[in-house]
Amino acid sequence: MSRAAAPGGFGVWLLAAGQTTGYATFNFAFAALLVALGDPQHGTQMSRTVLAAGPTAGLILAAVMAPRMGRLVDRGRGALLLRLGPLVGALGLLVASFAEARPALWIAGYLLVGLGQATTQFETCFALLTRRLGPAARGAIVKVTLVAGFSATIAFPLGDLLARHFGWQGAMWALAAIAVCVTVPLNVAGTALIQRRVGREVADPPDPAGKASALRRALADGAFWRLGGLIALIWMNHAMLTTFALPLLAGRGADHGIAVMLAAALGPAQVAGRVMLMLAGDDAPLGPVTLATMAGFVVSSLMLMLGHGVPTLWLLYALAQGGAAGIATILRPLLAAEILGREGFGAIWGALSVAPLMAQALAPVVGALLLTIGGGAVIGACLAMAVVAFALALSLRPRLRG
């Protein structure tokens, strides 16, 4: 089958663009506007701790809602979720923009943002692609994550530009407008084109009477819990090492300019990892790819631990961490489909998605507590997570091709 005739066609690229603008406006808006939000004269009147509580609450809600979103995908509502989710997130940004000195309103706004994230981002998109495209979903997911890897690259300069010209409140209004006027049309057009190619989205048939649901069968399978543990560990590892990259590198002897450069390299390294997987082709065996990716996380933490005053090891940390994280984003739904099957995939994937979302929400808190002990404690914890994740990947190896 030619690339042009591949299932999903151009609709997949439109969804990829929608995911890029969605992550730029919802996930990275807070970090991009943090300086403006905390400005003593022109920012909000809330502390950074209170400000950070908003996105954390949103991610926790997204984790709680993920199984419900997965079940809706199984009922044939995936395209509808992707179309409506950005509207919910945009409403959340608008509500939060009026918070100023009202923490409750700020958190309420970000709870709506979290609901928008649960409804419209990777978890829902990957579930829809896996259900609609079957084995061909692998190539589609690679394309989506490849393009979406540039969301932070867009968000930070755009957020800075908007904040300087319109203030933090005007910037949030503009980001909400992007969600409505750009992300929604991209998702509508993308899902429509996919529907035109592979047929209308339909609900999974109900299980026969007396037969356990697909999710219940998955929960009874020890592989579900091992895979969930692996996903949680690598996402906690990655969130901590990226959130605290600057102080950790400074503790290893890197000056501020070099630390910023290395932290910025994590994003392009993720894209490079995804390109490598795309070039390997859809037939690349998941077993070896998974073990190599988990080994990348181990190598990254090890390089950072050993890298006192050694710039070469700092660079290896950034390349290994970014590359492994980029590939791991793609592997998550592929591993779930191969190990646990595609029947009732939306519900199964939604349940598994709780792990990375909770890890992202809790990583800043856990990392900050460890950082009070020292940077070595953070790096040591991340290395331990990576080693355990590699061991879990080994235990899942018999269930994987290749």
Image: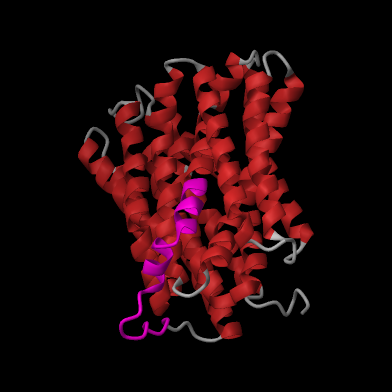
- Is 114 placed above or below 184 here? above
160, 92: nearer the viewer: 92
Viewed as shown, does residue 394 lie left or right of 179?
Answer: right
Residue 282 x %, y %: 72, 66
* Residue 24 in magenta stretch: no
In the figure, residue 315 lies in which quadrant? top right
Q: Is residue 36 visible?
A: no
Viewed as shown, does residue 382 lie left or right of 97?
Answer: right
266, 330: nearer the viewer: 330
Q: Quadrant of the N terminus?
A: bottom right
* Residue 207 in magenta stretch: yes
Question: What span is colored magenta in the figure?
Answer: 203-231
Residue drawn at the location 52% of the way across and 18% of the way down: 375
Residue 62 x %, y %: 36, 53
- Is 87 placed above or below 34 here? below
Residue drawn at the location 73% of the way across and 17% of the way down: 310
Q: Quadrant of the C terminus?
A: bottom right
Residue drawn at the location 55% of the way across and 46% of the way down: 392
